[in-house]
Image (cartoon, grey):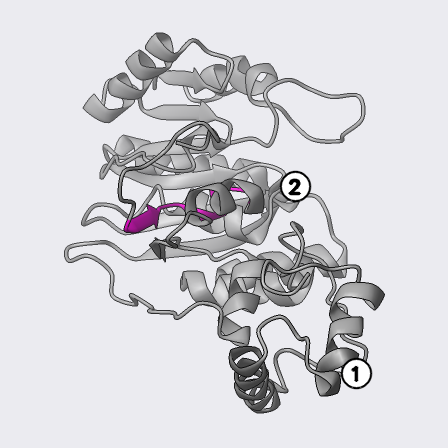
Amino acid sequence: LLYEGVSFENLGLVVIDEQHKFGVSQRARLTSREPAPDVLVMTATPIPRTLTMTLYGDLDISIIDEMPSNRGKIVTAVRESSKLDEVLAFMRRQLEAGRQAYVIYPLIDESQKLEAKAAAAEFKVWCDRLRPFRCDLLHGRIPAPEKQTRMERFRRGETSVLISTTVIEVGVDVPNATLMLIENAERFGLAQLHQLRGRIGRGEHKSWCILLSADKTPETAAKLKVLENTSDGFEVAEADWEHRGPGDLLGTAQSGLPALQLGNLKTDMQLMHRARVAATAIVEWDPRLEAPENQRFRKLVVEERGRSFSNVS
């Protein structure tokens, strides 16, 4: 559907699920049709750029803040990598109680450029650690049929522990999986960590997400503390927005610092609303900014900012 050659007879509605998985250009190809379709985007963790669009009024927002019924609570805890033995003891108790677990790594194979553990390299270590419980390995380079076979084994309860990369981030539903251990948690973004922990707590049992990290920097501690303090995806997204910046609404950057010199997107929301009302009135009256009194706006938008809009340039 993203190919330019694809044409629609009468496209009226575009629904984009897991919106954070798509780039700006990809979403634009689906929505920049004539006539413009209605658009519904859905995500548990809006990217910074999307949150900024809601502040500017380019997107209306609805928040679903209720969990499905019969879902167990998820407890998130940050632990130093040196505490792994304690974590393993807790994991064994969960497995002996009949529960299942995920162990997540940021890499498939070890890298000389990154000080991070890898799923394939650590798989045998986990098999030895957790005997007699069965472990399976899952990552993006495994052929799709074999990947499906291993996932089905885990879903049926034949495998107790799944050692995986972020390939399980979406679309995996195993109610009996109540424990997730994320190695090198500092290597993941806030939104990605929240998406990953959403793979547990899908049944009636209480679940635990343990974030392992050897990084003791204040920045990492503050980031991971967000996950400990809230299970609300929108709060996580707001923290991500503050940490990474709002992105570029006129370009393709989905995070990064804004071009504002004095304004603050979070504290100046009322002023932004007034500015948007005024800007809307100007564009409705002079959509191409051709009036003499609007030449300063046109110069700011087109010449000084190097931007172009379909209804301006």
Answer whether residue 230 is visible to the viewer in this image.
no
Question: In the image shown, does 57 or 147 lie closer to the viewer?
Answer: 57
Question: In the image shown, does 66 or 303 lie closer to the viewer?
Answer: 303
Name the disc covering residue 187, or none: 2
Q: What's the magenta region?
A: 12-23
Question: In the image shown, does 83 or 277 lie closer to the viewer?
Answer: 277
Name the disc covering residue 262, or none: 1
Distance between the alpha carbons at the discs numbered 1 and 2:
32 Å
Would residue 17 be counted in the magenta stretch? yes
For the point 48% across and 15% down, the residue is 128
Would residue 185 be counted in the magenta stretch? no
Q: Position of residue 247 (x, y in %)?
A: 66, 59
Q: Quadrant of residue 260?
A: bottom right
Q: How many marks?
A: 2
Q: Above or below — where is 50 with respect to 90?
A: below
Residue type marked 2 = Arg
Contact (CB < 8 A) between labels 1 and 2?
no
For the point 57% across and 68% down, the residue is 52
Q: Residue furthest left?
A: 70
Answer whether residue 244 is visible to the viewer in this image.
yes
Q: Position of residue 74 (x, y in %)?
A: 35, 54
